[in-house]
Image: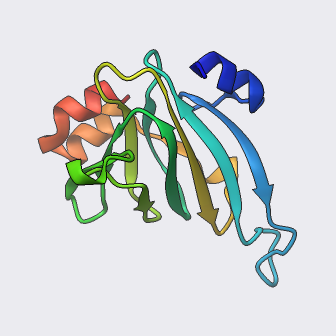
Amino acid sequence: MTAQEIIRFLDLKRHPEGGFYRETYRSFEAIPGTSRVLSTAIYYMLVPESVSKLHRLKSDEMFHFYLGDPVTWVLLDPSKKVRKIVLGNKLQEGQHPQMLVKSGTWFGGSLNKGGSFALMGTTVSPGFEFDDFVLGKPEELLREFPGAEKEIMELT
C-alpha cells in the first residue's frame, strides 16, 4: 500500500506537530478525582514531506512501530541528555519496535533518508490532552540544549 492509501484507509488527519493521526482509543475510566482518562492511543504516520516537530507532553508516551520505513527520533530529556532512537523492524540493525518517551522530554523525529512512510502507534498514560501538548521554540531549545543545534533546527 502507498502512504496515501493508508491515510485514506485509516482515515488519518493532519496532526499539529506534523504527520497524520487518528485517535483509536480513549479510556472510559478516569483517574479518581479528575477528568483525566487513564490512557489513549493513536495511529501516527510520517511521510517524507513531514516531520514530528519537537514537542513535549505531561504524560509518558509509548511508541509502537507497525510498518514502513525507519524513523529516527531525537529525545532531549530534562537531565540535558540528547539521545537518538531509530524505530523500525530491522532489529539486527539496532532498530527498535517500541520506544518510551517519559513525560517532560522534548522529542521529535523524521523518516530516515529515502523512506516513503512509517506507520506507528502511540499509547499515552495518563491519557493525551491537547492542553498538555507544547511545541518547542527553537530559541528556547537552543539555550537549553546547545549541543543539539542541528537536530533542533531540523525539527522546529
Q: Residue furthest bottom?
A: 32
Query: Is 144 placed above or below 26 here?
Result: above
Q: Residue furthest left?
A: 147
The colour scheme is rainbow
Q: Is residue 122 left or right of residue 143?
A: right
Q: Quadrant of the C terminus?
A: top left
For the residue pair 95 and 124, the one nearer the viewer reads as 95
Q: Quadrant of the N terminus?
A: top right
For the residue pair 51 and 31, the one nearer the viewer reads as 51
Q: Estimate the x, y position of residue 22 in percent, counting from the top left.
A: 72, 39
The residue under the point 36% across, 37% down is 70
The residue under the point 43% across, 65% down is 102
For the residue pair 39 and 79, the one nearer the viewer reads as 39
Query: Is 47 placed above or below 60 here?
Result: above
The residue under the point 80% across, 66% down is 27
Dividing the picture into quadrants, the one containing residue 110 is top left
Q: Estimate the x, y position of residue 142 in percent, counting from the top left.
A: 23, 38
Q: Is residue 48 left or right of residue 20?
A: left
Q: Is residue 104 left or right of residue 21?
A: left
Q: Estimate the x, y position of residue 138 in percent, counting from the top left.
A: 32, 32
Q: Estimate the x, y position of residue 42 in percent, counting from the top left.
A: 67, 48
Query: Is 96 placed above or below 30 here?
Result: above
Q: Is residue 13 left or right of residue 63?
A: right
Number of disc labels: 0
The residue under the point 41% across, 58% down is 99
